[in-house]
Every structure is written in C-alpha cells, then in structure tokens.
C-alpha cells in the first residue's frame, strides 16, 4: 500500500486543532477550529476523493481519540468519510494506549517504523494518515510517506504545533496536483523525490 498523508495547515504551518476549540489544547493552544470559517464544497469534494482511495488508516493516538469520539456517532454508511472510517482497518501508533475499542482498530506499540514498513508491503491502494503530526514527523524522518496532500488555509495563527519542525529530513518534492477552492484553500499534492538540492545565484568572477 502507498502511504499518504493528508493534513490541514495554516499559512504559517500550524496543524493543531483544526476542527474545534477543544480538539487539542496541549501547550495552552487556544485557537482551535480555524478550519471551520473556510470549509466549502471544494474542500469537501477533495476530501471525498481522498477517502474514495483508502484501504486502511494509520493514526497517532491523539488523532485516533478525536476521531473515535466523533465518527462512530455518524451512522450513515453512505457518508463518504464516516462509512470508511467506521468500517476499514485502523492502525494506531501509541506507547500509552492499551486497547482501541473502535471497530477494526489495532494498537501498534513496538517499533512503529518497522511496523509501518511491514504494512506498506500489504496489498491495497492507500494507507492513509490524517493529521497525526508526531507520527507523521517520525515517518518523514525515515522516508516512509509516499505522498502528501497539504491543504493550506488562508489564516495565520502565530502559535501551535507545526507539521514541519526543526530536525526534519531535508527533502525535495515534486508537485503532482494543485487546486484552489472557493474560499481560498490552496490544495497541493506532493511526492518526495529525494534529498534537498542546493545551488547559488552568485555571479562567476
């Protein structure tokens, strides 16, 4: 399976608590819910397309708990997001979670990178990461993510957890798809193509 990451980001790279004020207040974050004013049909169409390609989910503990507290309550099996989240396999990367009660969930508590590499060998289309910043950063450092769907919202917060932090692996990307929604959400799909390259604009003497 191909591992894909889909996440919402502000223009200054914050990914924390996009869906509501109480979603993730760690670190004293008080600006949750910044996605809501911009949510539109273009965003919904894109996300429906993402969920149409999924065969399993890979989630960090916090994202798993947020999802498990909401999506099981959406019981319409025809819902393009809830229907898949509630039915398909969900792998949870956690060293603190003893069990995961949401249907078809498995806790991975050993060597996460090794477990994820094993999952990549399974047949299927996409093993999807949604949010899950700490997990995503750990996998990026090991070149285990094959594709990035980054949705940039036209807002700057100035604080909060970011997807790309200090100490990341220098990486070059190829843009494979790009679009903009009615409310100004810029959606970019990237594929990593190797280590970052460098040059200079200095004039030859």
Image (cartoon, helix red, strand yellow):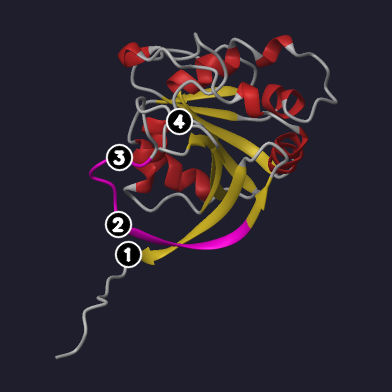
What is the C-alpha distance between the residues marked 2 and 4? 20 Å
* Residue 15, numbered label: 4
Residue under numbered circle 1: 196
Circles 1 and 3: CB atoms closer than 8 Å? no
Circles 1 and 2: CB atoms closer than 8 Å? yes
Task: Indicate left or right for 186 with 95 as reference.
Answer: right
The span shown in magenta is 164-177
- Viewer can see residue 113: no
Q: Of marks 2 and 4, which one's residue comes earlier in the chain?
A: 4
Q: Secondary structure at mark 4?
A: loop
Residue under numbered circle 3: 165
What is the C-alpha distance between the residues marked 1 and 2? 5 Å
Q: Of marks 2 and 3, which one's residue comes earlier in the chain?
A: 3
What is the C-alpha distance between the residues marked 2 and 3? 11 Å
In this rendering, the label closer to the viewer, 2 or 4: 4
What is the C-alpha distance between the residues marked 1 and 3? 16 Å
**Residue at the location (75% across, 37% down)?**
48
Q: Secondary structure at mark 2?
A: loop
Q: Of marks 1 and 2, which one's residue comes earlier in the chain?
A: 2
Work out whether residue 149 or residue 101 is closer to the camera in this orientation and state it: 149
Circles 1 and 4: CB atoms closer than 8 Å? no
- Viewer can see residue 53: yes
Depicted 117 relative to depicted 75: above or below: below
Q: Of marks 1 and 3, which one's residue comes earlier in the chain?
A: 3
What is the C-alpha distance between the residues marked 4 and 3? 11 Å
Determine which quarter of the picture holds residue 83. Answer: top right
């Amino acid at each position: 399976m191909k591992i894909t990451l889909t996440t919402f980001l502000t223009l200054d790279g914050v990914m924390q608590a996009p869906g509501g004020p109480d979603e993730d207040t760690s670190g004293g974050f008080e600006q949750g819910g910044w996605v809501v004013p911009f949510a539109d049909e273009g965003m919904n169409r894109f996300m429906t397309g993402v969920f149409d390609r999924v065969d399993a989910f890979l989630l960090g503990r916090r994202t798993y708990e947020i999802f498990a507290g909401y999506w099981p309550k959406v019981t319409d099996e025809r819902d393009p997001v809830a229907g898949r989240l509630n039915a398909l396999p969900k792998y949870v990367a956690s060293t603190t979670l003893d069990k995961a009660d949401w249907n078809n969930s498995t806790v991975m508590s050993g060597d996460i990178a090794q477990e994820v590499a094993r999952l990549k060998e399974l047949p299927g289309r996409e093993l999807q990461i949604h949010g899950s910043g700490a997990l995503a950063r750990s996998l990026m450092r090991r070149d285990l993510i094959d594709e990035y769907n980054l949705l940039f919202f036209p807002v700057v917060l100035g604080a909060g957890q970011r997807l790309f932090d200090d100490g990341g692996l220098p990486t070059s990307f190829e843009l494979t798809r790009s679009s903009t929604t009615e409310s100004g959400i810029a959606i970019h799909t990237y594929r990593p193509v190797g280590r970052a390259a460098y040059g200079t604009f200095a004039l030859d003497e």
